[in-house]
Image: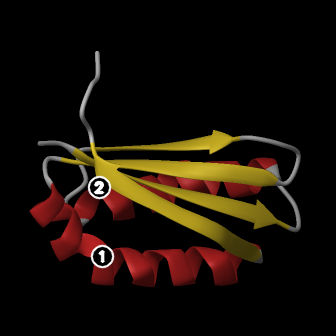
Amino acid sequence: MAYVTLTLWSASEMSDEMIATANEKYVPLVMSVGATGVQMVRTGDLTMCVITQYSDAETAAAAQEKIAEVRKQAAGEFTMTMEGVHAGEVFASN
């Protein structure tokens, strides 16, 4: 069964450079650790969420150590704070 993580972030700024770096650097990094998809969604002027899809819970669990490193790197590069993490198995989708 597919598995998804959702992280909530706040940042001191949201620049075009930050968005470009997210696309060029961080999306490929997340994909390289086993994700089947990732979406970074701007939810406010200084807030965003990252939705990461995995094929199953086992793949997600195996990726979490590397994902923690990616999160730490992003938080340092962009002066961001992770406000929360949610995760679970997908039980319905289209």
Residue 79's quadrant in the figure?
bottom right
Residue at point 78%, 47% (across, down): 16
Instruction: Classify residue 15 as left or right of residue 93.
Output: right
Residue 44 at x, y percent in the picture: 83, 42
Above or below residue 17? Residue 94 is: above
Judge by depth and name the residue closer to the eye, 29 or 87. Answer: 87
Residue at point 53%, 52% (across, down): 50
Q: Nearer the viewer, mark 2 or mark 1?
A: 1
Q: Which mark is residue 64?
A: 1
Q: Which mark is residue 31?
A: 2
Question: Label 2 sits on what residue type?
Answer: Met
Above or below residue 43? Residue 64 is: below
Question: Label 1 sits on what residue type?
Answer: Gln
Image quadrant holding the N terminus, namely top left
- The residue furthest front is 91
Above or below residue 91? Residue 28 is: below
